[in-house]
Image (spheres, helix red, strand yellow):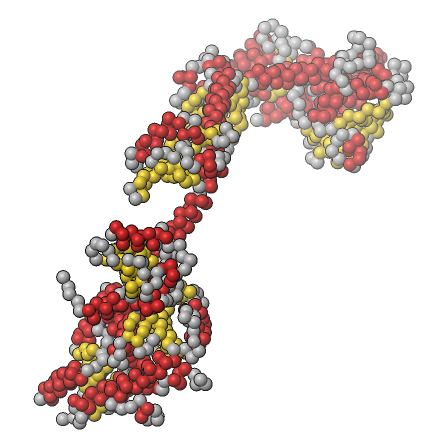
Amino acid sequence: MIRLEIEQLVTAFDALDSGIVVLDCDQRIVSWNYWFASASGISADEAFGKTFDELFPGRPIVRLTTSISDALSVGSSAFLTYTLNPDLLPLRTRASLPLIHNVAVRPLGQRPYSHCLLQISDVTGAAHRERILRERQNARYDAVVESASDAILTLDATGLVQFANSASFRETSFERAELVGRPLDHLFEEPERWQELWVKVLSGDTSLRAVEFVARRKDGSRIFLDVSASRWLSDGRVFVTAILRDITERHVAEEALHELNASLEQRVADRTQERDRIWQVSRDMLGVATTDGTWISINPAWTTLLGWLPGEIRGKTSEWLEHPHNRHKMRDAFASVALPEQSAEFESSFRTRDGEYRILSWTAVNVDGLLYCVARDVTEQRRQQDALNNAEDALRQAQKMEAVGQLTGGLAHDFNNLLTGISGALELLQIRISQGRHKDVERYISTAQGAANRAAALTHRLLAFSRRQTLDPKATDVNRLVRSMTDLINNTLGPEIEVTMTTAPDLWTTLVDPNQLENALLNLCINSRDAMPNGGKLKIETANRTLDAAEAFSVEMPLGDYVCLSVTDTGTGMSEEVVQRAFDPFYTTKPLGQGTGLGLSMIYGFAKQSGGQVQISSALGRGSTISLFLPRHFEQEKTAKDSTDFSLAPRAGAGETVLIVDDEPSVRMLVAEVLGELGYTAIESADGASALQVLRSDTRIDLLVTDVGLPGGMNGRQLADFGRIARPTLKILFITGYAEKAAMGVDGLDKGMSIVTKPFAMEGLAARMRELLQR
Amino acid sequence: MTAGPTELLNELQLDALTELVNIGVSRAASSLRELVGSQVHLSVPNVTLETRAGAIAILAKREISNLVAVHQVFEGDITGRALLIFPETKSLELVRAITGGDLPLEDIIELEQEALAETGNILLNSCLATIANMLQRSLKMSLPEVLRGNAATFFSLAPPPEAGDVVMFLYINFAVRERDISGYIAMIMDLPSLTALTHLLNEFIERSTGETAHSLDDPA
Amino acid sequence: MPYKLLIVDDSKLARMSAAKALNALYPDWNRIEAANADEALSLAKQTPFDVALLDFNMPGRDGLELAAELLALRPSTPLAVVSANHQEEIVGRARAIGAVFLMKPLNEQALGAFLQDAVRRLEQGKA
């Protein structure tokens, strides 16, 4: 035990950094130290003998007084903290700030206690710091908790809510009084689940994750909550803080998403089913191939259409199915779609199982390196198209024949006249020669020749006109064409109709099938004739016409240059109704049996085909004008060869012999005469058999001239073939009619053979013969 | 008085006072080093005498933010208050520097009061004790108290200021762990105390240099 | 024999105090004074000195820095760094460059011991 000197004690007393007050049994101040004097502002001397009440009036220091009296009476000690006893004494720091203090009260000495000791300690700094810390902490905590959008509640160990942040009231719409101090169970739809969680949390399980709950707000509305809770200790006491996050929106969204997904799945399934069905059901062939043409996937239409099974087609290209003529077409087409996004359209023929071919119209598209193909069976269509084309051709021909039929009467008449002329001339010739009068012989011969020529020309024209030909547009001089038709037209129209032809000089060329044009013109003339049963006037006119925009528009044609061929008559004319329907096929104003009504529609079709137009201008009782507009063509007509002059006919070489075979004696005689004139030796035969005999003999024959149509089982062609066996280098000249030539075709002529058609000009015959012999 | 406070002490007296303060501060550096655990740089470039108003003005001009101060009272032949003043922003720096390491903010705040108090205590005590000792006097120092406020509050603490009160004002450079925490030391004393101080300084000068303070008044 | 002492301290009082102490110990010695490191260096270059007393706590370069520079000029000069700041770092640094550390306030005894030792070294150096 340390013993201090009195002086030291006194010094120590006043050197202490805390307050000491000594009171007597009457609670009067005996002394207090320097520290307390500074802190209270009252010196020890001043305080001596006074009580606290007297020194510090008006202070609520009941507890202090009680403690002091307790200490004095029973010897108990007391500890009064500032937290529970703020401002016990009015003390100030050296900086004159309130001095926060704790007071300890003890009795001094032994019983009976005569004095009491008070110790006053300065805890200003500590209190300050604690307050600051607490404030800061609170501030931080408050900031987080109050600003949180989730409900944060603190519950004690018994499950009662001790604290709820503002969000709690917003979220649940309960009021503070309805939440604080009560358990939370009432909030949840399944309180037992909440209890389960509670128990787990209380037990200190830290592995818990947020749990979903369904809760009811005050108004009964349902909300979905994500609840997380954790336990914490404070001074040994257990608390649980729970965070309730409102996930109603998310929940609703999730449910909506589920539904959407479900419906989406359904829709996808539907779409897929739809697409599957289309694939299965489609009549068109659908397929997927690699870029090299190997088929990966094909739909049932392949089997339906072609009869092959999928296994036979898949895994290889379809070249084996293709028509020999267009083999590799698929491959080429596919090659053209090698690049992505490319597509190709083409036709190809595939062989069916039954061995026939079907025409397929393909579309192939390259998507992502695979070729997606669709093929449509267009066989029927093509056939129909062909049939249609054929029908059209037949129709044209039929129509032409109709026109020809129309001519027959007139032609027969003409021929009659011509023949009359010829026979007449010959008769006169006979008479004159028998009379010995040779003076007019020339004239009669000329007449006869002229008539014969005209007859030949007419026949030629007719034959040319009637023969079946495919459309063959050529640069045509319409004027020349019209002029060449003069005879025919005159024949058609008869003597009662006055015909004038006005042709424009320097008429432009047009690109048109000359046959068709002839046909059209003839038809128009026939129509006009029929419109003038009692005779009248007919004018045929050609002209150059340039249509400006307005005119072109009015005739529904592009503007530009046209060749116009018009036929005007002074016939009965057509009413407006008739004009409207004039071009309709089978429309006719003629009585039954007279005319098919195809003429104008054919003309219309022909004009349109040639890029032109037909215009009708007519009025009842005033005649009609039909105008044909044909676009101008900028190439010149290739003129046909002019017929050669007989006087230029080449003459025979020495000793050249010609074998003539024809069943018609007059023809034989004629040819023989000509041959003789030209210096050839002629041998005649009436049929193939006798001719062949000659050919098999040693007789020199340089040329065989034979009619193709011979009697007796062997025709000219056959004769030629047999003759060639005996004489391989025999030159042969066939005489044929027009139709036969067409039938023979170009193939029929071998080397050293030639052909000439009846009727022929003598000098033409001679030229041909010369040609052959010279080769 | 018409003369400014600085004229209250002559050059040598001021020099002596400065030297005393520097010695005191250097001692404090050693003590602080033990507290801090790494080298402490402390120096007092100069000492001036100001009026309260002047001191307030200087502080107000130099430091805009709020201030924190460690306050102690000294009593004896010289009586007055000593304040170690920092800008509030620097106080936490000081605490970090003193405590070292990277303590979380909460801890720093918790320690702030204590750290400031003890640091201030070391510095102020050292200065005052040295002065007292060298002047062969004893001074009783109170325990440190941390205050927050501004220049006006610090220099107007009760009891109310008296006319003629003088402030010994010094700027103190304080660097620890590469942190530069500079502040001010202000000692407020009344005129009687200053007079006493002057006497004591004269005695001290004589003892140290063997010459009187006044004999060196003339420029050498 | 009289040596020359260089006293460097920003406080005039301190210089005077040191001078007084020197007088008491070695009255015949000369001394030169400087208030800071720059002054000290320029003086040192002009006037040779034998021993130096350097205050640690000075504005600008402190006593230890100055010590290093002076030793660079004149190696093995006996130097003392004076400070009330006896932190181990400072004491250590002083010793590291071969300077003696003296506590402030300087007392005659401590100064005397240092100067004695200095003289001894100077004598040895000459020999």
* Residue at image point 32% right, 56% down: A102
Q: Position of residue A389 (x, y in %)?
A: 64, 18
- The residue lying toward the viewer, choosing from A101 and C78, is A101
- The residue lying toward the viewer, choosing from B43 and B166, is B166
Give the answer, above or below, for where B123 lies relative to A179: below
- The residue lying toward the viewer, choosing from A21 and B90, is A21
Q: Is residue A698 visible?
A: no
Q: Is residue A375 visible?
A: yes
Give the answer, above or below, for where A94 lies relative to A618: below
Give the answer, above or below, for where A566 lies relative to A546: above
Q: Position of residue A710 (x, y in %)?
A: 62, 9
Q: Quadrant of the C terminus of chain A?
A: top right
Q: Position of residue A596 (x, y in %)?
A: 76, 12
Q: Quadrant of residue C15?
A: bottom left
* Residue at image point 25% right, 78% down: B133
Q: Quadrant of the N terminus of chain A?
A: bottom left
* Residue at image point 25% right, 50% down: A74
Taking A142 as reference, is B175 left or right?
A: left
Taking A451 as reference, is A623 left or right?
A: right
Q: Position of residue A266 (x, y in %)?
A: 48, 22
* Residue at image point 37% right, 67% down: A41
Q: Quadrant of residue A181?
A: top left
Taking B81 as reference, is A3 left or right?
A: left
Residue furthest to the top in view is A712
- The residue lying toward the viewer, choosing from A128 and A121, is A121
